[in-house]
Every structure is written in structure tokens, then in C-alpha cells.
Amino acid sequence: MFTEYPLLVISKDKFYRDENTRKFIESDPHILAAYYFQEEIYNTVTVQFHEDLYSYETWSDKILEEGKIIKEEDRHPPDAALFSTKRILKYDPSAPFRVIERGFKRGEIQEIGGLSLDLLSINILKMVLTGKAIRTNENFLARTLDVHRNTIIRQIRSLLKNGIVSNPVSRFPQLLVPPDYMLIFSLVEIKRRCQEVEDFIRRDPHVPLMIKCNVGRYNYLVAGTFKTIEKHLEWQENYTQNFKNCIEAIKSTYLSPAMTFSINQNRVCLELIKKKLSMLPDEETIDFNRSKHENMT
């Protein structure tokens, strides 16, 4: 996805709060996640992926032209920050699990999402989140697509080799964070010892995503995951103390699970695949929204 959609947009928007907005956000092929939000005039935060700046601006213009989720007379320019996925320094969605694992071993974390934890559940989580307990079902693909299993294996190897897909893993349902944890997008200005700070963040389990950027005065986007705002502020203070006179400014947006409007981590990828398949009119394609039986009949 990062290859096909190298433009990540995190946008604070003003949308109508009605059924049309809900349907639009839940079906749009570019919106990965949306959150209820209130800051000044803005009431929504969206996480989007686009091909380029032209694609994003064309998409934005179309929204206004259709007038479904905001009319021109009610429009307020979005507060959008743009990031290149080519500048991602760290992307490790399973990193926050190490926070849970460490907390469990210390006796500080006894449950997650209402589920009581024990050593077995911790080990299972670790295996599925890192992909060690998940494998591609070549037999299912061969039956569903009506091709030989060896053909499926060769195709998968080719996709992996060319970086089109990665090995299968499980993800937390929330974007980048475990259940009951907050997602915090922080724009950070680092003026000195940048490489040291980068290396430290790469090892930090609280941070699943870090991107180099140029957004106003800020040169990094850091996505953090914390149970409470207090924990995040404590973490932030540790960084400013460990790297004195290096971190000049921080601007954070806090998104709690209760603020979740819509998250579909597969939709953007699936819509992209459908778009690619539609360009192959002579190929028999599979409907991702139908059941296995329907696709085979």
C-alpha cells in the first residue's frame, strides 16, 4: 500500500454529522480511519492515503462538488499534514505488544480489552502479532481461484520478492494501538542529535510509527500508544530530559478508543486491489465481498 499510495494525509476536518457522512467515511477507498474530534471548528480527524498531491486535491474538490458531507458555504479549509511514506523511519504495528508483555511480567498489566491475561495468552498474542503462528493457506487460494497450488506458491513468492505484500500477521483492531490504548500523533521538532533520537525511538515499543517530514517547524511525525494522557506526558518528559536542548517543540493530537468513528485496515488495500484488477478485463477476478461458496459457483 505504501508503494501505491505514497502520500499519507492526517487531516482535521469539519464534516456534517449525519448518515451521509457516515456512509462516505465507511466506504471511501482513501480513508483508512476516522475519529470524532473537537478542536476549534474541526470535528473529525481522518487518516488517508493517496497516490500524490494531485490525487489528494482532486479527491478534496470532488467532496465539495458532490456536497454530501460538507457544502461550499459551510466549508472550512482542513488542517491537513502531508507525509511521504517513502520517508518512514519505523513501521512496526506489533511494537506496542512489548509494552503489554513487559507490564504483564512486572505485574502492572493484568488484562487487555476486558480479557484477563495469563502466560499462555501473552505467548499466543506474541505469536500471532509477529506472524509466527500465521501462514498463507495455499490450498484455500488454489480451490477458490481454481488454479494449481504450485501456481499459487510461485505467485506468492513473486509478490513477496517484489515487496508487493509482506508475510501475513494479525493486527490490533484499533489503528496501531492495543485495545483501550490511546493513539497519539505528535509532530516533533528535533534540532540536535537527530540520529541518536531516531535510534532511540526505533527501539521504543511505545512508538509503532515514525516518519521524517517537513510540516511547518516540525521535522518528525511520531505515533505513540499509551494507556493514559499522564503516561504519555511522563514518556514525553523523559525524552526531553534524556535529549536536553535537542527537542525544540512538540504538538500532539490525542485520539482515544472512544473517539473512533471508523477503522478498516483492509479497505484501502482491498479497494486498491480491485482497482488494479479492473484494469485487467480479460482476467477472471474474485469478488472480495462475496463468500467462498459464491465465488466458486
Image (cartoon, grey):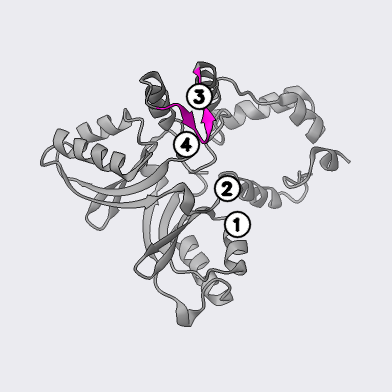
Q: Nearer the viewer, mark 1 or mark 3?
A: 3
Residue 156, x across and y down, in percent: 64, 28
CB within 8 Å, label 1 to label 2: yes
Q: Which mark is residue 26?
A: 1
> First in sequence: mark 4 or mark 2?
4
| Magenta stretch in the rendered image | 109-118
Q: Nearer the viewer, residue 250 or 43?
A: 43
Mark 4 sits on what residue?
A: 178
- Residue 15 vs 279, above or below: the answer is below
Residue displayed at 61% across by 29% down: 158
Name the quadrant containing residue 232: top left
Residue displayed at 58% across by 73% down: 68
| Amino acid on which the number 2 mark rests in the picture | Asn
Residue 130 in the magenta stretch? The answer is no
Residue 7, x across and y down, in percent: 44, 52
- Residue 194 vs 80, above or below: the answer is above
Let me know if residue 108 appears in the view. Answer: yes
- Residue 124 vs 73, above or below: the answer is above
> First in sequence: mark 1 or mark 3?
1
Residue furthest out toward the right: 297
Residue 65, x across and y down, in percent: 55, 76
Cα gap from disc 4 to disc 3, whole angstroms: 14 Å
Mark 3 sits on what residue?
A: 117
Q: Nearer the viewer, residue 257 or 221?
A: 257
